[in-house]
Amino acid sequence: MENDLKGKVAIVTGGASGIGKATAILYAEHGARVVVSDIHEQAGNDVVAQIKQKGGDAVFVKADVSQARDCEQLVNKTIEAFGSLDIAFNNAGIAGEENAISDMSIEGWDRIIAVNLSSVFYCMKYELQQMLKQGKGTIVNNSSILGSVGFANSAGYVSAKHAVVGLTKNAAIEYSRKGIRVNSIGPAFINTPLLAEAGIDDAAKKMLVQLHPIGRFGESIEVAELVVWLSSDKASFVTGSYYAIDGGYLSQ
Ligand SMILES: NC(=O)c1ccc[n+]([C@@H]2O[C@H](COP(=O)([O-])OP(=O)(O)OC[C@H]3O[C@@H](n4cnc5c(N)ncnc54)[C@H](O)[C@@H]3O)[C@@H](O)[C@H]2O)c1
């Protein structure tokens, strides 16, 4: 158990599963009090229970991050529960519709932009308002390797994730002098339930693994380690950056 986040309060959106779940648990192991947020109440409460079982402190707040009002409430409920907001990991996301651009539905496009991009703007807007009051804070936004390169039949996802990188840079320019650091991360393929949602079966996995020079997909805990470091004071000179965590995917 490390204590480098002791006294800090952290929000994790999409905290009920995958990368968000691993990060929520690791934040708590580093001493932070954690607000686990998701649309899935049962799974979110299970993560809270897991944190408490290990001696940590956490609450669950239900929020659909595609709704601005929910993001505002998430920050308000964090302050009600723990009195401050020091760290935010804007992580919730979906795979969304997979189609070539000419075949993609308008609804599919609107949905992925709402969940994977507008959500990050909504969450940051309210998180930053609170962090400005406190005069400090750190934010990490979960982009993807697809925030840096394209991927066939994923125009909505790729566009949203590129925009998350841009939004992060802008936030860093606007808030770094006010004590708030903002960074994004770019994971390659990570073993989480999102892969099944994206229709990646064993055959597809075999092919996709080849795109990773390291020869495997990543694990959620490996991404969580990077997020916790970026969120901590150890990363005090890091802001506006995009950190690939990709087993070499983008090196080719
Ligand atoms: N798994 C990968 O290969 C991979 C790679 C790069 C980036 N990412 C990104 O990592 C993030 C987390 O994905 P994951 O792989 O852990 O997936 P996951 O499906 O395991 O977890 C995503 C969580 O987000 C929640 N969620 C979905 N829509 C939501 C909404 N509208 N409001 C609130 N919560 C919502 C889900 O309920 C789920 O608990 C996503 O932004 C994803 O795009 C994943």
Image (cartoon, helix red, strand yellow):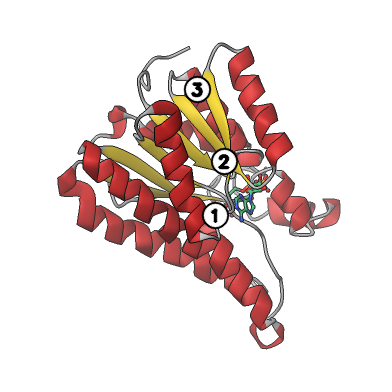
Q: Please tell me whether mark 2 or mark 3 is closer to you in this view.
A: 2
Mark pair 2, 3: CA separation: 14 Å
Element carrying mark 3: helix
Q: Earlier in the sequence, mark 2 or mark 1?
A: 2
Q: Is residue 157 in view from this perspective? A: no
Q: Three-letter amino acid code at disc 3?
A: Ala
Return the mark for residue 28. 3
Q: Three-letter amino acid code at disc 2?
A: Ser
- The residue that label 2 is drawn on is 37
Mark pair 2, 1: CA separation: 9 Å
Closest to the observer, 123 or 17: 123
Closest to the observer, 245 or 234: 234
Q: Are marks 2 and 3 in contact (CB under 8 Å)?
A: no
Q: Is 207 situated left or right of 76 in this image?
A: right
Question: Where does the image place residue 156, in percent across and percent down from the top left?
Answer: 59, 72
Question: Where does the image place residue 115, in percent across and percent down from the top left?
Answer: 57, 61
Q: Please tell me whether mark 3 or mark 1 is closer to you in this view.
A: 1
Q: Are marks 2 and 1 in contact (CB under 8 Å)?
A: yes
Q: Are marks 3 and 1 in contact (CB under 8 Å)?
A: no
Residue at 69 percent across and 39 percent down: it is 41
Closest to the observer, 197 or 81: 81
Q: Earlier in the sequence, mark 3 or mark 1?
A: 3
Q: State whether label 1 is within 8 Å of ligand 1.
A: yes
- The residue that label 1 is drawn on is 65
Residue at 66 percent across and 35 percent down: it is 44
Mark pair 3, 1: CA separation: 22 Å
Residue at 48 percent across and 59 percent down: it is 68
Task: Relative to 156, say whether 16 is above or below.
Answer: above
- Residue occupying the far bottom of the picture: 102
- Residue density around tag 3, few if under 14, some if 14–19, many if 20 or more, within 10 Å: many
Q: Is 141 situated left or right of 60 in this image?
A: left
